[in-house]
């Protein structure tokens, strides 16, 4: 795992993706997993399912996760998709890649919608704090 700070993240999702990808490209990875920092309930179990699915089907371009919907982070992207990720522009994330018929992928159903709670607003952050308190008995 590597955490990379992107100083141009305010310019859009594509900048964050490129920054993270450029940071790991020198290690020549077979794949990368893109996760969002504001999704605190993503589990190692979910990440391991992405990895295991990819290892069992190495011809896949991506392995995404979902809970009753379209693919969303965390997502494992194979090295075949690195050029497509680097060509994204502005605030366009990788959703267009996940929806494209040009790429072969699998979307895994997650056990809980809580995995995908994120803190984009103060209200959403409050919901996360509340849920965290409930699961930790506070």
Image (cartoon, rainbow, N blue to C red):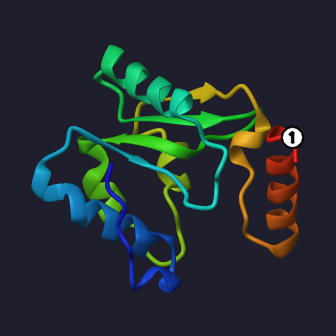
**Compared with residue 19, is residue 117 higher up or lower down, i.e. above or below?**
above
Direction from residue 91 to residue 117 in the image, left or right = right
The location of residue 14, given as percent across then percent down, is 44, 70
Q: Is residue 40 visible?
A: yes
Direction from residue 89 to residue 30 in the image, left or right = left
The location of residue 3, given as percent across then percent down, is 37, 61
Q: Is residue 87 visible?
A: no
Number of labels in the image equals 1
**Compared with residue 130, is residue 89 higher up or lower down, i.e. above or below?**
below
Quadrant in which residue 18 is drawn: bottom left
For image coordinates 28% across by 22% down, the residue present is 58
Q: Residues within 10 Å of mark 1 (few under 14, many from 20)?
A: few
Direction from residue 7 to residue 107 in the image, left or right = right
Q: Which of these two is toward me, 25 or 127? A: 127
For image coordinates 67% across by 40% down, the residue present is 70
Task: Farthest residue to the front: give it.
Answer: 138
Quadrant in which residue 87 is drawn: bottom left
The location of residue 108, given as percent across then percent down, is 59, 26
The location of residue 102, given as percent across then percent down, is 40, 40
Direction from residue 98 to residue 29 in the image, left or right = left
| Residue on which the image places disc 1 | 137
For image coordinates 13% across by 47% down, the residue present is 28
Tag 1, which secondary structure? loop
Q: Which of these two is toward me, 63 or 125? A: 125
For image coordinates 25% across by 57% down, the residue present is 83
């Amino acid at each position: 795992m590597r955490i990379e700070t992107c100083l141009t993240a305010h310019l859009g999702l594509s900048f964050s993706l490129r920054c993270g990808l450029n940071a790991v490209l020198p290690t020549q990875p077979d794949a990368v997993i893109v996760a969002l920092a504001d999704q605190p309930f993503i589990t190692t179990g979910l990440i391991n399912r992405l990895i295991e699915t990819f290892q069992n089907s190495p011809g896949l371009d991506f392995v995404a996760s979902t809970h009753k919907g379209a693919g969303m982070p965390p997502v494992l992207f194979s090295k075949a998709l690195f050029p497509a990720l680097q060509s994204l522009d502005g605030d366009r994330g990788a959703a267009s890649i996940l929806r494209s018929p040009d790429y072969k992928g699998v979307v895994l159903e997650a056990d809980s919608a809580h995995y995908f709670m994120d803190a984009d607003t103060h209200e959403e952050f409050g919901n996360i704090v509340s849920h965290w308190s409930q699961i930790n008995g506070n």
